[in-house]
Image (spheres, rainbow, N blue to C red):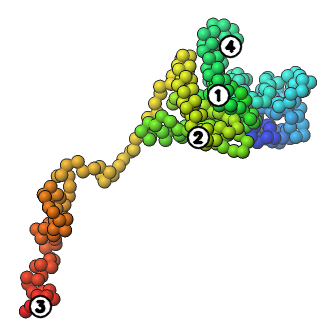
Amino acid sequence: MTYHVLIVDDQKDVSRLLRSALETIEQGLSVSEAPSGEEAILEASRIKVDLLIADFRLPGITGVELMKKIRARNPEVKVILVTGVSEPKLLREVAGAGADAFFSKPVSIGDFLDTVERCLGLARTILHTPESDRAASAPEAEERKGLSSLLVGLRKDLNAQAVLLLNGMGHVEAEAGHLPDPSVAVSLISSLMGMFNAAQRVASLIDHAENHLHLFDSDNIDGIFIPIGPAHALLLMGKGLADAKTLASKMDLLFTARVEILHALQSIGVAVEEVVEPVKPQQHSAIDEPFTRPEDLPSEFMDIFSQIGKKTDDANAFWDSATEQGTTFAEPDKLTYEQASRLGLTPDSAQEK
C-alpha cells in the first residue's frame, strides 16, 4: 500500500529537507509539497492525503486551520505540525491543536522519521529506545555519553560551532553544539551523504584509500567533512576551520579523534570494519595485457630485439647493422637502396657506368 504524504511549508529548503529525509527510509511513500495552505487544500481535494506535515506559520491560513479544513473532508488523516515559534503561548496552542505530533525547529530527523513510521503504521526502521528499556541499557547509554564527550572535547579543541557524527543513512549518532542554520540541516546532511557515498566509492577504486577530506570555506562559516571508518562521517562547522595556516594542526587533532571515535563505536556494538569492494571491469582489451615473455612479441620485432643484449659502442652502428642484416619488415616486391645500387639503378651507380 502506498501512503501519500503532503508537506506544506513556504520555505522550500525546509520542505525539501523533510522530503529527502522521508526518502531515506525507503518505505515507498508518495510525497508532494505545497507552499501555502490554499494550495495544500487543492492538493488534498485531488488526492487522498494519509499524512499532513504542515508548518504552523503559513502565508494565509495557519497550519492549525489547514489541519481542521483537511480533517473536515478526511477525518482519518494523520497530522504532524512543525513550528519555529518560541513564544510559550503559541507553543501551547500548537501542542493543544489536536495534531498527532508536533516538532519545534530544528527538527530532530531521527525522531521525526520514527514518528512518521508510527503514524502510518509502517515497519520500524529507525532505532529508538523506549523509555521502559532505557534503565536496562545503562552501560550502552554511558558509552554513548562517552562518544558525545569526545565530540564535545573536539569541538572545544577546534573552537568549532558544531560537531556532528553521522552514520551512513545520514542520521545523527552524536553531536556537540548546533548547526549555524538549523533550517537547512536536512538538506545539508542529505547532500553531504550523497557526496560521502560517492567519495567512498572513489576511495575503494584508488587502492582502497582510507582517507578523503572535504573543506568548505566562506567569509562567515567553514566546514570540514571527513570519514570515520567506512560507514560514518564527521561534520564540523565553525569560523576559520578551513584556514590554511592552522589546517595541519587541526588535521592532527581530527585523525587522533577519529581513532578514539572508532573505538567508542566498537564499544557500543557498531561494526566499523566493513570494506566497500571496488567495481570490477566487465571486459578489457588485449592491448591492456603487458608482454611478459619474449615469444609474446610480434615476430617482426624479434630480429631487432634479439640483438639488444649484444655489446655495441655506437647506437647508429647498431641500427645500421640490424638494417643490413634485414628484417621481416622488408617487402619482397621492393628493393633496398643497397640492392638497387648493385643493380645500377641508383644515380651514383649510373654515373660510375
The reply to whether the C-beta atoms of the residues labelled 3 and 1 are less than 8 Å apart is no
- Residue 196 figure quarter: top right
Which residue in the protein does label 2 denote?
214
Nearer to the camera, 73 or 221: 221
Looking at the rendered structure, the secondary structure element under dot 4 is loop
Tell me if mark 3 has few (under 14), some (14-19) or many (20+) residues whose alpha carbon lies within 10 angstroms of its own: few
- The vertical placement of 231 against 286, above or below, is above
Q: Is mark 1 on a helix, strand or loop?
A: helix
The residue tagged 3 is 350
Q: Locate residue 117: give its quadrant.
A: top right
- The alpha-carbon separation of the residues under discs 3 and 2 comes to 77 Å
Tell me the distance, in whole angstroms, between the alpha carbons under discs 2 and 4: 36 Å
Mark toward the start of the polypeptide (3 vs 1): 1
Indicate which disc, 3 or 2, sits on the residue closer to the N terminus.
2
The amino acid on which the numbered mark 1 sits, given as a three-letter code, is Asp
Spatial CA span between label 1 and label 2: 20 Å
Mark earlier in primary sequence (1, 4): 4
Q: Where is residue 126 in the image (x, y as percent from the top left)?
A: 64, 23
Q: Is residue 309 among what the camera can see? A: yes
The mark found on residue 130 in the picture is 4
Question: Which residue appears at 16% of the width and 68% of the height?
Answer: 317
Residue found 11% across the figure and 88% down from its top: 349
Residue identified by numbered label 1 = 157
Q: In this view, does 322 lie to the left or right of 22?
A: left
Pointer 1 with pointer 2, Cβ within 8 A: no
Categorize mark 4 by other alpha carbons within 10 Å: few (<14), some (14-19), many (20+): few
Name which of mark 2 and mark 4 comes first in the sequence: 4
